[in-house]
Image: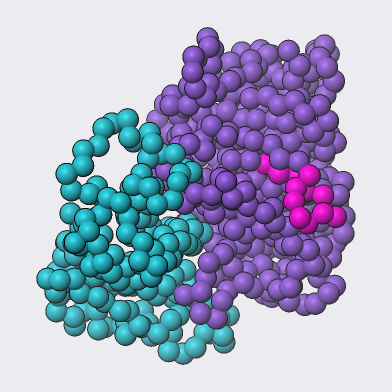
Amino acid sequence: MIGKGLKRKLSDDDLLETAVMQKGTGLYLDQRQSVLNISLDKFHRGQMMAEPSLRRSVLIANTLRQIQDEIRQENSVGVLAENLEPSNNREEDFSLSSAISSILKELDVVLDGSSSPLDTLVFKSDRSGNYADGYKLCDSVFGNFEVLSSSYLNDVPLDDLFLDIDTSVYERESGSLGSVLNLNELEHIMEILVGS
Amino acid sequence: MAGVGGGNDFQWCFSQVKGAIDEDVAEADIISTVEFNYSGDLLATGDKGGRVVIFQREQEGNNRSHSRGEYNVYSTFQSHEPEFDYLKSLEIEEKINKIRWLPQQNAAHFLLSTNDKTIKLWKISERDKRAEGYNLKDENGRLRDPFRITSLRVPVLKPMDLMVEASPRRIFANAHTYHINSISVNSDHETYLSADDLRINLWHLEITDRSFNIVDIKPANMEELTEVITAAECHPNQCNVFVYSSSKGTIRLCDMRASALCDRHSKFFEEPEDPSSRSFFSEIISSISDVKFSHSGRYMMTRDYLSVKVWDLNMESRPVETYQVHEYLRSKLCSLYENDCIFDKFECCWNGSDNAIMTGSYNNFFRMFDRNTRRDITLEASRESSKPRAILKPRKVCTGGKRKKDEISVDSLDFNKKILHTAWHPKENIIAVAATNNLYIFQDKIN
């Protein structure tokens, strides 16, 4: 979460709290990173809740998109933040951006119970070749927000009825161990984002 | 010290508290909605366990002159049960999201109660007489042998202990894909609307197998979803008008005469954002958690995370009044985001004459604002100040610097003690405040 070699004092937590701060400062970037991490974690947890709240998910997704847009803007303009190491800047920015992009695409699929299935997910591998795992998310959330009752058979395309029983999830090699493996992969993603 | 809602000598006093005193709160007992009926004689609460408890105000005949009628339990019933959606492997919560009373038309009382998916119309009626002397049944209800009946008699009505029965008269199901957040009875007393995250439906109270979809904000591509409906309400006297609020802090007023599908609003209310206070959480704290028309129908009030705003229906560009509920939380938004408190949905309410408004906060505090004098007060719903007719002491949160005696610092606030639901009697200065599993009733002290 913090650039290498920089120590943080306890009092800086209060500064991180401050909602309004100067864009482009190290403190601002720290808070943005913090909010990004919290948001990702929240979103994943939210999907695994017994009662996923659409409002909550949408608000978190919007927050993530806002941060993603900011980072994209900064990358395209070539603005380098102060506390990122100069040598790794471009690479880290791009991997951060692509990681957010892939996770947001998962979000999109996850929010939509009736989208076309897994081939819309874009998994970017990091340097060591591991993939972001969104299968757990999709599996638990497909149609989470949609109840297929008889009165809706008219306006729900027939294909969507079979989304829930998509068995390719079980055929996928790396996802076979279920939640433990998924957690590990999620953690790996977090590590990439955190840059540690 | 002057309070809010009445004349200069106005003060709020404790009247009653309902619910268990236990520190250990059962999840099912958490109150999720509070609503007075049109006369104020009945007060209904719904809880997370799907139960509805109705309190009735005692008649004032034999009471001491300085105390008002107390509210006692009138009826308790299980409105909703947990359901399981086998297709999605999802449980549908039995939590009562909203209760709305229908105006009384005969001796019975009717109310609508809803959970996330199903709305029910309940009839609450009294029985204080029993028929005796049936021909075909004996005293115990057993059928009499027909051959033994040699004469006919007319059954007589005898008084019995009052029994209050609640029976479900209509069940309005299967019309909402997403979670229902609001129901609102129309001023025509024949129709009502129900709103979920993406759609609003209009129902006729007599018809359960059909509803009209009047608002649909679901995008064709769910990837484009960035906004949800958070609350909706019918106008108090124009039966063709309703409003709905969104997670982006906007309110749309719609006229059902304009078109069948009210996707295009008649009016759009949004306050331009103050660029100097923009943060990562700006959108989240602008999300409107409740919208209520004034009794007059001329104004409406919205509650977002940090403030309450009063809007004139004739002015869409900005609210006419803004009241800060707990501005001291603005610097804590990151923590509140982390612990999910930022998503809490606070409600708000008007008093009967529309000159005062009330809403809840944390630490079991609730706030009242007098629109005329611009005075505000913070009070606490706690067992400590629960002596009969004890005057409530105003509370104050210390925002920085030296904490005075009796003030509480922001960091000491208990964010688990939230007051999300409050209600104000339609005619008198009596308020009901839900604090987790307890219902507090406060009233004014007549000086």
Asked whether residue A6 appears in the rendered view, the answer is: yes
* Quadrant in the picture for the C terminus of chain B: top right
Which residue is found at the position 58% from the left and 74% from the top? B218
Q: Which chain is purple?
A: B
| Magenta stretch, main secondary structure class | loop
At a point 36% along the width and 61% down the height, the residue shown is A79
The vertical placement of B228 against B156, above or below, is below
- The letter of the cyan chain is A
Residue stretch rendered in magenta on the structure: B308-320
Q: Is residue B98 above or below residue B410?
A: below
Percent position (x, y) of residue B281? Answer: 49, 50
Residue A13: give x, y in percent of width and height: 34, 36
Residue B26's spot in the image, x, y percent?
43, 37
Answer whether residue B316 is magenta in the image: yes
Q: Which of B48 and A88 lies nearest the eye of the viewer?
A: A88
Specify whether residue B17 is in view: no
